[in-house]
Structures are given as structure tokens and as C-alpha cells.
Amino acid sequence: MPLVQLSQVAMHYDEIGEGEPLLITTGWARAERAFVAHRDLLARSYRCIRHDHRHIGLTIAADAPTQISDLADDLAELLERLEIPSARVLGGGGMGAIVALELAIRHPGKVSALHLGSPCLKADPFLVSLMGIWTRLRALDPVLWAEEVTHWCYTPETFATRGDLVQGGMRARAQEETFSHGNGFARLVQAYSTFDVTDSVGKIRCPVQISNGGELDLITGPRMARQVHAAIPHSELVLFEESSHNYFTEDGDRFGKMLIEFFASV
């Protein structure tokens, strides 16, 4: 996994595939876990680039207050260093979607098409409170935190019938060193909690597809995806009604087909 020195961070990233560039950015996960079930599928058609955000994985950054706009600027600079004028962008996992939103707003020429997974215009009081609880819980017991977060990511049906998927996600959160320093998770939660593009999201002009879980996704949920869809009039909204926050693995085949069709059409 290469390391590239940017103005504020030394960013780790990886690449697979050939073709037009596709930047893959996700939330609270290291690059190697970013859409791992779909990376090979996407790499058949695209040069797929994944990365570690600042405060995550092997990216080196100062332990300092951070905004989502900082993460977006990091990605714009990464594209410049890789000599990529513009790219399709897959932003998912909640935080990856809001970073991708900021990237498209702040650097519109660098985004040719945008898929947003579980986005929001801003975190509502419910989500801010939930992330605050998670921050305190993780400081007390990271393994218990991993178990708790996992319960918010899958439906009861998935727990009952696909225990391997649930346990795999739980182990990955509990065992990997996701955050690069002790304050990393808290820094990203603070960035998420203060994010707000309500007044600027209408600037986005590239093709936009939005996806989200159904009403069983209480983390971000359709309530937030519908707000983003309404604020970007030319966008498309796809809800995975029978799935929760990790709909992209619960209904992975449908999700992969949707991505391929969307990116091929733009």
C-alpha cells in the first residue's frame, strides 16, 4: 500500500484494476475493508483507488481538530498527486458519503459522477447523541464498542440467518487497529457531528446516485437520504427497504449491480 506525502498528511492508499479512475472512500474503516466485497467487481472496469482517511489506519496525520472539509481536501490533493484530473467517486459507509459530498462541493471539477451511501446534509440530534455514546463506550472498552456498533449495522433477520456475516464484521471492528492514535475516533466523530452542507449541496452538478438502507437503519436511515435527494434535484435515490446500515453487504449482489449500471451510464 503506497504512501504519498500531501500538504498536511502522509496518506496511504491502494490501487487495483485498469481503466477510468474510481475513487472509493468509506467511513470508519481502513482502506483494505472499503467495499471489499465489490472491489474486484469494480476493478474489472475501473482503476479503483482506496485510501485511509487522516486518523485512520496507516495514514499519518497530526492529532488535531478535524473537519469533514479537511478530509475532502486531502482527497482532492491525492487525486492531484496521482495526476487524475477527475474521477467517479464512490462514497459510502456514512462518513465516506459526507466526505464525498464535500469533495464535490469544494472541488467540483474533480468529481465526474458521485455515488453516496448513507449520506446526510448534517447529523441530526439523534445521530450526534448516538455517536457521543459510542465515543465514550470505545474509550472504556473497544471490543464492547465493536459489538455495540455491529448491532446497529444489520437487521434482526441478518443476525438470525447470516451469523457469519455479523460475526465477521464484529471481529473486524474489534481486532483491527482502525484508528491511528488514541483520539482518532473522537476526532472523526467531532468532524461528523459539526458537518453541515445544507446551504451548499445545491451547487453539485455532476450525476448523483444515493443509496440507503430501509427503516431498520436507525443510524442514518432514509430520513437523511431523502433530505439529500430533495436538495440535489437531479439525483437518484435507491432504498434497500429490507436492509439496515450495512445494506451493501446484506444485499450485496443488488448493490454491486446498481453501482456497475450507474457508473457505466455516466
Image (tube, helix red, strand yellow):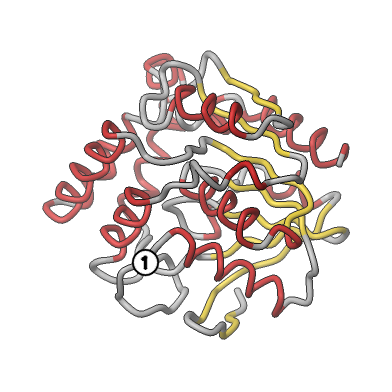
What residue lies at 43% left-to-right and 67% top-to-bottom?
Answer: 57
Residue located farthest toward the front when viewing the structure as drawn: 199
Which residue is under mark 1? 66
Residue 212, by quadrant, is top right
Toward which corner of the image does residue 253 lie, by quadrant?
Answer: top right
Above or below, comparing residue 172 to residue 103 in the picture: above
Residue found at x 42% / y 31%:
220
Q: Residue drawn 65% across and 54% down?
A: 104
Spot occupied by residue 170 in the image (x, y as percentages of width and height):
35, 41
Circle 1 residues within 10 Å: few <14, some 14–19, many ≥20: many
Task: In the rendered view, tell whether residue 88 sits above or below residue 150.
Answer: below
Q: Position of residue 192 (x, y in %)?
A: 37, 50
- Which corner quadrant holds the N terminus? bottom right
Q: Is residue 191 left or right of residue 104?
A: left
Report helix, strand or loop for mark 1: loop
Q: Where is 235 relative to 238, above or below?
A: below
Q: Please state the horizontal and vertical placement of residue 174, each as a whole percent of the image.
A: 30, 50
Q: Position of residue 15 (x, y in %)?
A: 70, 66
Position of 105 with respect to 154 (left or right) is right
Q: Amino acid at mark 1?
A: Thr
Q: Quadrant of the C terminus?
A: top right
